[in-house]
Image (cartoon, rainbow, N blue to C red):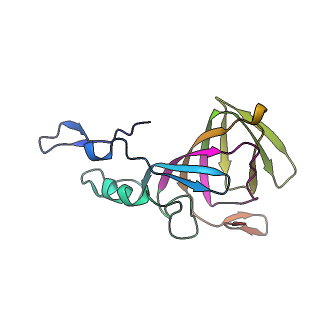
Amino acid sequence: MSLFVTTHNTNGKATVVKELQNEYHEMPIPIGTIKMLWSNHEFPMNLSTEADIEQYKHDRTNKFFPGEQRICPEKGAATCMISMKPGAESAPHRTMTLDVIVILEGEIEFHLDSGEKMVAVAGDTIVQRGTMHKWVNVTPNGGWAKWVAFIQAIAQPIEIGDQVLRNEWAH
């Protein structure tokens, strides 16, 4: 899998950042592996410099971001690819993020704290809006599941009635 990051040369023409090609760092996590595809630490972004590229060079070698968000910079966004081992199950957790998840391979059963369970298959999209959830790989025949998550930090906390909801991590 190749990575192509574009930028501008001194003449304002589009070019590819050559030193980033083929530079993914896949890291183990309890349920499988994670690859940081891209990240940014501010929104909206300033693309007049290459500060975001320099920050990504650091981010791609770490499993989690500093701060409470862990899966996303505190005031930014991240895109990652997660591969889930056959039969793996995450701990229940909540993140103060908006996650748009596209299932690429396999089948993922997601559980919500209301007791609802849904199965998403390759081609499906899940929009995770700061809710308590967990993931279970239910891919037939012991297959891996893979998805891409587009993650954006949200203002926290989430207030529902008299409840205040915050990040919750079991690990």
Q: Position of residue 134 (x, y in %)?
A: 75, 52
The residue closer to the viewer here, 137 or 101, is 137
- 153 sits left or right of 169 in the view: left
Give coordinates of residue 30: x percent, y percent.
Answer: 66, 57
Q: Residue furthest right?
A: 115
Instruction: Say above or below: 146 vs 60.
Output: above
Q: Is residue 6 left or right of residue 116?
A: left
Which residue in the rendered view is the most extreme toward the front?
A: 142
Q: Is residue 96 visible?
A: yes
Q: Is 87 left, or right, of 167 in this rendering? A: right
The residue located at (79%, 69%) in the rendering is 162
Depth check: give the residue in front, 22 or 4.
22
Residue at horizontal 11 percent and vertical 41 percent from the top? 11
Q: Is residue 17 visible?
A: no
Q: What residue is shown at x 38% (from left), y 40% (from top)?
A: 3
Q: Residue at x 43, y 47 (%)?
A: 24
Give the residues in magenta: 77-99
Image quadrant assignment for residue 93: bottom right
Q: Quadrant of the N terminus?
A: top left
